[in-house]
Amino acid sequence: MKFSNLNIPVSDKEVKLNLEYTQNRKTSEKLPCRDPFILLYDNKYYFYQGAGSRGVVCSVSDDLETWSDQVTVLPVPEDFHGIKDLFWAPECHYYKGNFYIFTSVYSNKTNHRCISVYRADNPMGPFVDIADGCICPKDWDTIDGTLYVDPDGQPWMVFVHEWTSMPDHNGGMCAAKLSEDFTHLISEPVELFRAKDRGEGYGGVTDGPYMYTDENGHLMMIWSNGLKDVGYLVAIAHSESDTILGPWTHQDKLLYCRDCIPGCTDGGHAMIFNDKNGVTKITLHGPNGRRKDEAGNVIDYEHLLIFDLIEKDGTLDIK
């Protein structure tokens, strides 16, 4: 499969959607968001975001332009172990009849950022914890878990070993095999690469991995970093073996950065999906924070960006 949510079957369960459209929530009018994730299921688009003390929320759209009001699909559980940095970068993946949210919190169980896994039988929840609060090594800071299913059908979690718990503040990108029910890892994490492997001038941040296999079976990863004078960006890494274990090399040309498309801001933490017509899309947030004028007035803020994505010359390009 190209990527994990490409071929989701039409459901045989009715998902009741009691949606409201009381707010003006339009992509073209800079819908506020950070770390967006969009899932196409049963001809509707589900847009997931972390909402702090509100949990994980979801908006629904028929056209990727007009979105419903947010619905809480994962409320903060009672006696929750998360104490701050709640629900970073939630992703919702379909796998063999269930929906799984991967999201990150700062845990009072470990005193580290950790990735939690929640399951539901439909994309609107309710989602329940199935991994006892933390699925990755408990003495690491880990964020931004994503799903990859290899050609043999083995699910993997690809995730960030945060720079905050690395001795040289050089963040790592890691992968480990997932159990069939997604409750635990069944292999030790393998480090795929580190942030500064990309080259001089790049910081220690490894954000937002997402896997993509092209028409010729070549495996890529999009991920985000930052560069002076360019800001937050989306880079592409290529697996020389076309397997998750690499080795991984880094493409010189950036997929997305400030001014790579005329008039665009910086931006990142991207993911890939197919729309209803089979057109491959990439979504991300930009700019990375608020932009102010000389008087201190906000002139731009983090919002949802969606572009067409094409395969070109053995890599990916924004159309």
Image (cartoon, rainbow, N blue to C red):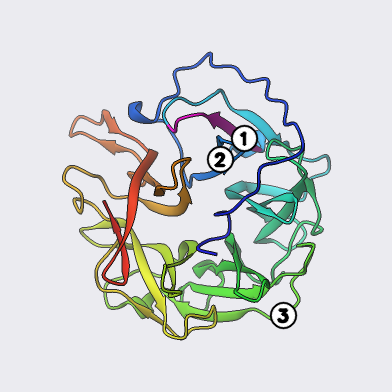
Q: Which quarter of the picture shows residue 68?
A: top right
- Picture residue at 62% right of the left edge, 46% below the top: 87
- The residue labelled by disc 2 is 49
- The residue labelled by disc 1 is 57
- Of callouts 1 and 3, which one flags the residue occurring earlier in the amino acid sequence? 1
Q: Is residue 304 above or below residue 207?
A: above
Could you say whether the residue bearing mark 2 is in a helix, strand or loop?
strand
Residue 75 within the segment the image draws in magenta: no
Rate crowding at label 1 as few (under 14), some (14 to 19) or many (20 or more) other CA atoms within 10 Å: many
Left/right placement of residue 263 relative to residue 246 reads: left
Q: Is residue 249 above or below residue 271?
A: below
Q: Which quarter of the picture shows residue 180?
A: bottom right
The residues bearing labels 1 and 3 have C-alpha atoms spaced at a distance of 31 Å
Q: Which quarter of the picture shows residue 199?
A: bottom left
Q: Most prominent secondary structure in the magenta stretch?
A: strand
Could you say whether the residue bearing mark 1 is in a helix, strand or loop?
strand
Left/right placement of residue 117 relative to residue 240 reads: right
What's the magenta region?
56-64
Image quadrant in which the N terminus is located = bottom right
Residue 289 position, x and y percent, is 37, 43
Rate crowding at label 3 as few (under 14), some (14 to 19) or many (20 or more) other CA atoms within 10 Å: few
Instruction: Answer whether labels 1 and 2 touch (C-beta < 8 Å).
Output: yes
- The residue labelled by disc 3 is 187
Q: Type of residue at label 1?
A: Val
Q: Is residue 238 above or below residue 282?
A: below
Could you say whether the residue bearing mark 3 is in a helix, strand or loop?
loop
